[in-house]
Amino acid sequence: MKTLVSLLAAAALLAGCATNTPEPAPQVRHDATRSITKIELVYNAQDQLSVMDGGGSAIVGWAGVFGPVGTLVALGVEVGTRVTMASRIERRSKEFTAAVKNSGAMPLNRQFAEQLAARLRTSGREVKLTPAARVDGELARMQVPGFQSTPGYSTLIVRVTTTYGAPDMTSSFRPFVAIEQSLRDEQQAVLHQTTHTSDLEEPAYLAYDGLLQDTAKAQDGLRQGLFRIVQPAYAGMFGEDAPSRLAGAETTRTAGLDAK
C-alpha cells in the first residue's frame, strides 16, 4: 500500500490536541502570498480513508496480576498484533474506503477543496479547482503526477489525509485529519508550505465492525474535522484578512472543475 508510511506517520499524531496549527510564518511570507489573485487549487480527487490501531493492548501492563501464564499470553498477543499491524491497516482501510464510496456520499476531499476555495473567494481571489491523483512523498517535494499548471494561475497543492485511529487494539477509534499545503507561483517555485491537523473525540467506535457499519456518521466525523481546518489552513497560508479587504472584495469569476 503506497500510502502506508504516510498513514503511519499520521497515526503518531493521534495523541495530539485538537486543531493543531504551526507557528505563524514570517510577515514577509504573507506579504508575498497576499499578492496572489488567481489560484489553481489542486487536490487528491479520490478519498483514501484509513483505519489503524497501534497494536497491542492498553491492559498489557496488568498482565502480571494473572500470574506467569497470563503474562506470557498477554505478551504473545501484544507482539502478535504488532507484527500483523501493517496488513490489518491495509485491509481495513480498503474496506472502509469502499464502504463509504458505495454509500454515494460526495468525497470528503472534494468537500474540503470546495470549502477552502469558497474561503479564498471571499478574499477576492479567483479560484480554479483541479482534481488529481494523490500526491505522495515529502511536503517539500510534492509533485502531482501528470499535472500541468494553468498559465496565469499560482498553484495551491493540497493533500488530505483522513483517518480513524486508536493507540492500541483495546481503545476506541476516533477521527483524525491532516491537511498539507504547498503554494507555488506561476513558475512553480514554492512560496510557502503549511500543515494542519485536527482530531476529535466523537464519533468513537470501540470496535472496527461498529465503524464499518456506521459509515454515514463516521464520514461526518471526518468531515467535521476537515471543516475545522478551513480557516486555519487559509490563515496559515495567507494570514488574516484585513477588514477593509473583505468588505471591498468583488465577486470574481470561478473557473469550473473542467476548465482548462
Image (cartoon, helix red, strand yellow):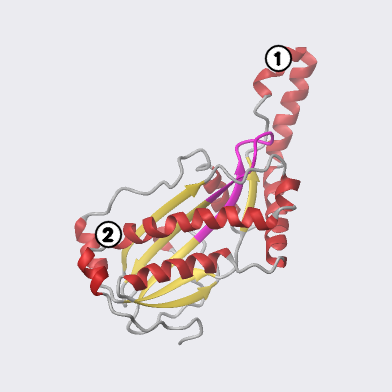
Residue bearing mark 1: 64
Q: Residue at x 75, y 30 (%)?
A: 77
The residue most toward the bottom is: 260
The part of the image, by quadrant, that contains residue 234 is bottom left
Quadrant placement of the C terminus: bottom left
Judge by depth and name the residue closer to the eye, 245 or 143: 245
Q: Taking 55 as reference, is 41 left or right?
A: left
Position above or below: 122 against 89: below
Q: Residue at x 44, y 80 (%)?
A: 148
**Residue 240, numbered circle:** 2
Q: Position of residue 29 (x, y in %)?
A: 24, 61
Judge by depth and name the residue closer to the eye, 210 or 65: 210
Q: Taking 61 as reference, is 67 left or right?
A: right
Position above or below: 54 against 179: above
The part of the image, by quadrant, that contains residue 48 is bottom right
Magenta span includes 185 = no
| Three-letter residue code for mark 2 | Glu
Position above or below: 181 against 14: below
The part of the image, by quadrant, that contains residue 187 is bottom left
Of the residues tagged 2 and 1, which is closer to the observer?
2
Question: Is residue 143 visible from the viewing direction of this image?
Answer: no
Quadrant placement of the N terminus: bottom right
Q: Position of residue 176 (x, y in %)?
A: 54, 49
Q: Position of residue 30 (x, y in %)?
A: 24, 61
Instruction: Give the extent of the magenta segment.
Output: 160-176
Instruction: Mark 1: give few (<14), some (14-19) or many (20+) Cα within 10 Å.
Output: few
Q: Position of residue 59 (x, y in %)?
A: 67, 24
Mark found first going from the N terminus, 2 or 1: 1
| Three-letter residue code for mark 1 | Gly
